[in-house]
Amino acid sequence: LPAVAEPLPVLGSDVRVPLVTGGEVGYAALDYGASAPALRRVWDDVAAYAPYYGSVHRGAGYLSQLSTELFENSRAEVGRFLGCRPADQVVFTRSTTDSLNLLAGVLPSGTRVFVFESEHHAALLPWERRADVEVTYLTAPRSRREAVEVLERALAGREPHGPALVCVTGASNVTGELWPVRELAAAAHAHGARIVLDAAQLAPHHPVDIAELDVDWVAFSGHKLYAPFGAGVLAGRADWLRAAEPYLAGGGASRTVARGADGRVSVVWHEGTARHEAGSPNVIGAYAIAAACRALTEAGFERLVAREQRLLSALRAGLAEVPGVKVLSLFGEDAPRVGVLSFVVEGWNSSHLAAALSAEYGIGVRDGLFCAHPLVRTLLGTDGRAPGECGAPEGEREQAPLNAVRVSFGAGTPDEHVERFVRAVE
Ligand code: PMP
């Protein structure tokens, strides 16, 4: 497919930043992996709707009816974007973290969870909070094939009956490497387990088709998919969601509530998506996610991917020329990746490097362990030591003996940002 020629217009592209070396320069946002700038198109869609929003579902007034329709249409649009099967539910959450915590909350008692130690903390940590769930941590594989083999071996050893869940990322937020999701899903299903895909980093860079990948659930965040903050999605099979207690207890999730003769309050909960969307939902956030799905589809997502891959090739070729640069990788040189890449430079403290990229070149990247401590320690060979904490204050991060720099980009990135970045590292 021919690549989209120009980046899509995004918010913030007119920001200019002062440089310590004098003068100013256009801000180069190369931290899409944390939060991507919103597409101008998404912002315009939201701005057109915002003056008319109202509370959804129970309002009798015109604007409540309009908002209810737009909210439910947004749900349907996100379902189409993800290739959902007819019986799948799309639940609006706050973020990927929220989506995975919701799923952890609805696991049947006794579920065995299998998760690679290399996952983002949002995918690694929610399961252990359930005392009645057993978690098996899988060693980070060093190839895509090994990922499937490690999972196969772990599942073969489990007692074949009883619920099981595999949680896997689609694209690593550290290396950008694509995980063999279809093969992992096939392995999970062959052993009677279900699988949830953490698509936080995959969905902004690659079309995700839940039916084609044959995964049971997909989780992602709006703020990484070119929509503003505040909303995320958990899409997939309805049965465990329907059978479990609501994520939050409150209005919206409850169908009828009555005070019984015993003085207690009894509740009948909704069975549909409302069950896990208690309280007044984030209508604007849901609408923005749907607008982003629309914008990517209409721009030609595959053609955006082709452009991103061209930028990625230029970035990798440029970094390969710089002595001392080591790009972090689990699966090796040839593994397919999205526009997310972490590296270290011999003799450089990564935090100083990231600070210099900002102060001297107006480039915004990220340094640290990227909320994937076990993975980054494996990649840096620092297992057993304790470099900087995720989210640690500035001063402490500077003390970190070993961490990495991450550069990440996407549909709004002009060629010039990547070119400037390579020049700056050089
Ligand atoms: N999973 C992955 C792979 C991520 O990169 C992130 C965000 N860095 C998350 C989950 C969590 O997303 P959020 O912070 O939006 O909840």
Image (cartoon, grey):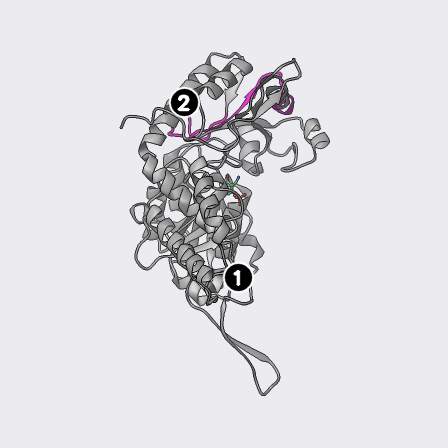
Q: Is residue 313 magenta?
A: no
Inspect this view and state whether residue 108 appears: no
**What residue is rendered at 57% in x and 84% in y?**
260
Residue 312 appears at what percent x and percent y? 41, 23
The answer to the question of whether label 1 and label 2 lie on touching residues, with beta carbons closer than 8 A, is: no
Can you see residue 66? yes
In the foreground, 412 or 55? 55
Count of picture labels? 2
Compared to residue 61, the image places residue 149 above or below, namely above
Q: Nearer the viewer, residue 249 or 47?
A: 47
Give the structural element (helix, strand or loop) at label 2. helix
The residue closer to the viewer here, 6 or 14, is 14
Position of the N terminus, as image quadrant, is top left
Q: Which residue occupies 41% across, 55% down?
A: 70
Specify the farthest residue to the bottom. 261
Asked whether 331 falls inside the magenta stretch, the response is: yes
Residue type at tag 1: Tyr
At which x and y percent is residue 183?
Answer: 33, 42
**How far apart in space, not on screen, are marks 1 and 2 (Cα)?**
41 Å
Quickly name the residue at label 2.
311
Residue at the spot 33% in from the left edge and 43% down from the top edge: 182
Q: Is mark 2 within 8 Å of ligand 1?
A: no
Q: Residues within 10 Å of mark 2 (few under 14, many from 20)?
A: many
What is the three-letter code of the residue carrying label 2? Leu
Q: Position of residue 252 (x, y in %)?
A: 50, 66
Along the viewing direction, whichever of 175 and 115 lies nearer the viewer: 175
For marks 1 and 2, the one nearer the N-term is: 1
Mark 1 Cα-neighbour bin, 10 Å: few <14, some 14–19, many ≥20: some
What segment is highlighted magenta in the picture?
Answer: 328-354
Indicate which disc residue 423 carries: none
Residue labelled with disc 1: 247
Where residue 198 sits in the image (x, y, percent)? Answer: 45, 45
